Image (cartoon, rainbow, N blue to C red):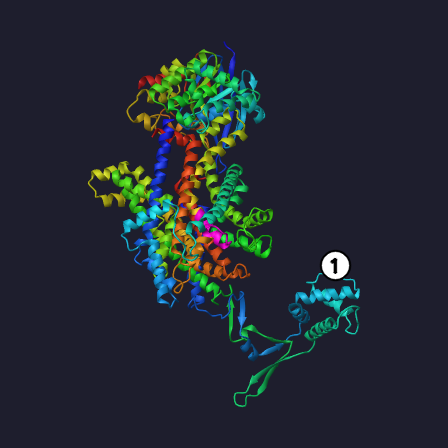
Amino acid sequence: MKGYRKYFTKKIMWFFITLIAAVILNFILPRLMPADPVSAITGKMASGMTDASAVQEIYKRYEAEFGTNKPLIQQFFIFVKNLLHGDLGTSFSQYPRKVSNILSSAILWTIGLQLPAILVGWLLGNLLGALAAYIRKGFDKVLLPVALFLSNVPAFGMAVTMLVLFAVTLKIAPISGGYSFDMIPNFSWRFIKSVISHYQLPFWSIVLVSIGGQAIGMRSMSIYELNADYVKYARFLGIKDRKIVGYVFRNAMLPQITGLALSIGTMISGALVAEIIFSYPGLGSTMYSAITAADYPLISATTLIITIMVLIVTFVLDLVYGFIDPRVKAAQFDA
Amino acid sequence: MGKVMLEVRDLKTKYVTRFHEDVYAVDGVSLKIEEGKSLGVAGESGCGKSTLALSLMGYYFPPLHYISGDILIDGKNISGLDPDVVRKTILGTEIAYIPQAAMNALNPTQKIIRFVEDVVRAHDPKARKKEIRERAEARFAELGLPRTVLDKHAVELSGGMKQRTVIAVSTILSPKVLIADEPSSALDVTSQKMVIKMMRELMDKGYIKSMLFITHELPLLYNVTDDIMVMYAGQIVEKGTAREMVFDPIQPYSHGLMGANLVPEDGMRDTKPTAIPGTPPNLKRPPKGCRFAERCRYATEECRTHSVAERPFGEGRMYRCRMSVEELREVYKDE
Amino acid sequence: MKNMFRQIFHSPKFVAGFVIFVIILLTMWLYPLINPGNPLEMIGVGTFARPGTYFSLYDAVDAPTETLRLSDADDKRIDASMSMEDRVAMVAWFEQAGVDVGDLDITDTDALLDLWRANYDSSTRLPGMTNAKRNYYKRLDRSIQSMQGADKYSVMHKDADSGEMVERSTINKTDYVNVAQVVNVKTLPLGTDNFGRDVLKELVSATKTSIVIGLIAGIVATLIGLTLGLLAGYVGGITDDIIMFITNIFTVIPSFVLLILISYSIGQEQRGASVVAIVIGLTSWTWTARSVRSQVISLRNRDHVNLSKLSGHSLVRIILTDILPYIASYVVMAFILQVSSGILAEAQLSLLGLGPKTTEVPTLGLMMNWAMLYSAHTNGSWWAYFPVILTITLISFSLNLMNTGLDQVFNPTLRD
């Protein structure tokens, strides 16, 4: 039990260290740039305005927003303090809406879409990869190149292809949005149905993209495991092949959890861009409209939220893996 | 004379390589082990001794293939039986196997007790968990293994403990024949002694009725087995009691093997198990004459063109050489 | 070395990837020779011209004509000009007139017209049909007939002096012009984009830019990763701790987020293609650093390195001669992957509107971004985005194939 506690303490500490680093980066990166992003925004906001007092107004607003007249370190503490209160600032483009208010619904849409999609893609990919390793001949020859090709289709490319195929050409799915545009979110059956039908394309496009990479990883892992000594030994003790395949699948699949943890950042980034294609009301689309509208506080907050999401997922996967794979237990807990 | 537990008649098996070439790794081996007796097999790596061990199980999967010959366990011929029947009724119960690399023989993510359950149930699907555990605990205790091992994963055990666990699990169903393929070669001296002691106990307590022990170190067998045979290039070149084989090896190869091992110069044993110059013949195309001729110091032209059969001498001994026993003894004396 | 190359080129995966990549590179190099000019030139005024061969209608008038009597010409003309509404109206007329239409397919113009000619009579008055409706059917019948008749078009020319319209020539239905004899012909294999630019020419140029972006990003990332990995692995101790601490942090924080933050902060004006490439490189070195470090650690205490140390060789020399050659294969593999992910990163950034400055050169990402901004995907202009997706996929596919091939050569345990 002592080993466990040490392991978890280490993991949690590491989680907070990366979190702090992420917050600092999120704060400092834009401020390190030669061109002051804030004045750039003000310039953009003020362009086309002839009223000098309106320009002044914008300056005042952004000064209040960022407190840029104060020294950097003080700004940082204000930033952190606000952050701890859940205050992510006020949106420029949707003034006077609070950024946290805009993001709170977007986060739910994104999590609701990506978490199941990535998990399903991961599971299906692993199953196919294991199958390819076990069946080998024929199936493997077809599946491997297909999986390799699929895994190289960019997420947005898959999104556009699916959209054109199923929504534009076959017209069996809606083209964009998270629900029908003439509805107001509520818990009616009609709304839920609309959400489900809008969910299909983004969901499956993310699933398809994640399957390929996972299948390839799982296949080589399974081949490696199938040649392991314990397989031969178990066979010679009369254990059925089906049972042995079970051992192999489990042993090959567990490290895939780490594989998922390592690639989750890339997967989420890809899926966020895919969201834009479907105008899905999640963080990706929010980020896109924020960038188009030069809404600096919203951009900054979205990137921070995405980072924190990725950190949490990685952290959880790490913990889960440590829990269920005795190989890690043995290697980590003793150390 | 005791009951014959294992009898092998003219067994031939082959490997099929990736490029569809046949490698005749076991080429006409015959042997007999009586109840309560043990037989050691010695030879350089690549001489076919490990393949012999696998071939004896009567359970073939690629790349190993059966060609001809009989394997009789306690009078019952198992060659030619349906593989699934062999798996269910022979493996583990009649004949059991201890692999060369016990380090990796156990599924790393499975608890030992789960594996024991799988082994027992492969032959008796109705066996109850509680009974299996009781049986395993009793057997482990008797063999001097802590019962806590049962609830550990393989990764949590030390090398020596893993090897002993493998031996205990292999023999849990009290097989009539135990095939041990270099069970101690990867261990430190203390662990090696423990393993040898354990094998003895298994015999003494009647958990196994006979044993075939394979090693590349001929002298090791002196302490372990009753009889010894030496293999070269897929064939047996000499057979006799342990004492005879160690102190009076007749055939030029076993003579050389014995000599090489009795001079444990530093470094020598690590790099090459034998100091006999040259390399074994390519078993894809076995030589027409005596297989050892190319490396034999006493070989004549006739040796290269005429094959030699097994020649009996003394009390149940056998050797494979064109020269007579007297001639050979004479030659050795001169050195 | 020679043997290694032979082994590499025996891997079917590597060869397949290599061939695809070389074909892409050759196209990039050869196509501008056939079709030179500025890829961003807006040749079309409208948006999204379909792929195909365009010839100047003006010049065609002056081109020598041949008379060809093609039996199906009329039918084709009618087929092309008859709208869906007309067809539905015709069927409605049949039904009202009590004509048995059977299982008539209204897109089958031949069958529809046969039935029409056999049954329609402008003098019949169908019960309950308004006059307006009757006149509509009369007009429809007349236009069908005129398409079959001997109507001609007159080409008029406005006299510069008198301002009068002078007939210059007439065009018969049987007049044909050889495309080769029309002075101005332009083939646009992939049509034009939303700005009226030749998509194929743009695509070739964009592929080149994107690959260069990938290469720059890969080089930057590999240099950083290699340096940090070598330092961490070889020097060890506190240096290793610090470098690994930083590397671990940047492994978990998604590089795409950093990319967005930096790109946004740089601002549109400063964001040239090479700047974007460098920024991508700056955010994607962690893998190289990690794998180089672990390789170097396993090499550090090998005999040949120790021998070199004992011989008093300098750190640089040891690294160059005793370590780099052994990790070269890993570095090359990591580099290949970085090129491919760099190209993808640029595309994703551009889709977010944070791509390179749009006025200089096209990139694959920018082309994608433009196509999406102008809804090419919803208005059926597949040529504006699909070739882009395919190109990105093929580049990334070929690079990954090469990488897998190399992996199998250098890590034989994975070989099957």
Q: Is residue A27 left or right of residue C121?
A: left
Q: Residue furthest left?
A: C312
The answer to whether residue C45 is magenta is no
The answer to whether residue B113 of the structure is visible from this angle is: yes
What percent of the width, then of the height, locates residue B228? 42, 17
Residue density around tag 1, few if under 14, some if 14–19, many if 20 or more, within 10 Å: few
Q: Quadrant of the C terminus of chain A?
A: top left
- Helix, strand or loop at label 1? It is loop
What percent of the width, then of the height, locates residue B330? 35, 16
The answer to whether residue A281 is magenta is yes
Residue ID at (79%, 64%): C99
Looking at the image, is C123 positioned above or below residue A297?
A: below
Which amino acid lies under the numbered mark 1 shown in the image of this protein?
Answer: Asp
Q: Which quadrant of the figure has residue B287? A: top left
What percent of the width, then of the height, locates residue A142? 53, 45
Q: Nearer the viewer, residue A9 or C20?
A: A9
Q: Nearer the viewer, residue C106 or B208?
A: C106
Q: Which quadrant of the figure has residue B283? A: top left
The answer to whether residue C397 of the structure is visible from this angle is: no
Which range of residues does the magenta coloring cover? A268-284
Q: Is residue C11 left or right of residue B76?
A: left
Q: Nearer the viewer, residue A305 or B7?
A: A305
Looking at the image, is C95 positioned above or below residue A3?
A: below
Looking at the image, is B53 positioned above or below residue C76?
A: above
Q: Chain of mark 1?
A: C
Looking at the image, is A328 positioned above or below residue C387?
A: above
Tell me the chief SS of the magenta region: helix
Q: Quadrant of the N terminus of chain A?
A: top left
What percent of the width, then of the height, locates residue B260? 33, 22
Residue ID at (41%, 31%): A327
Residue marked by disc 1? C103
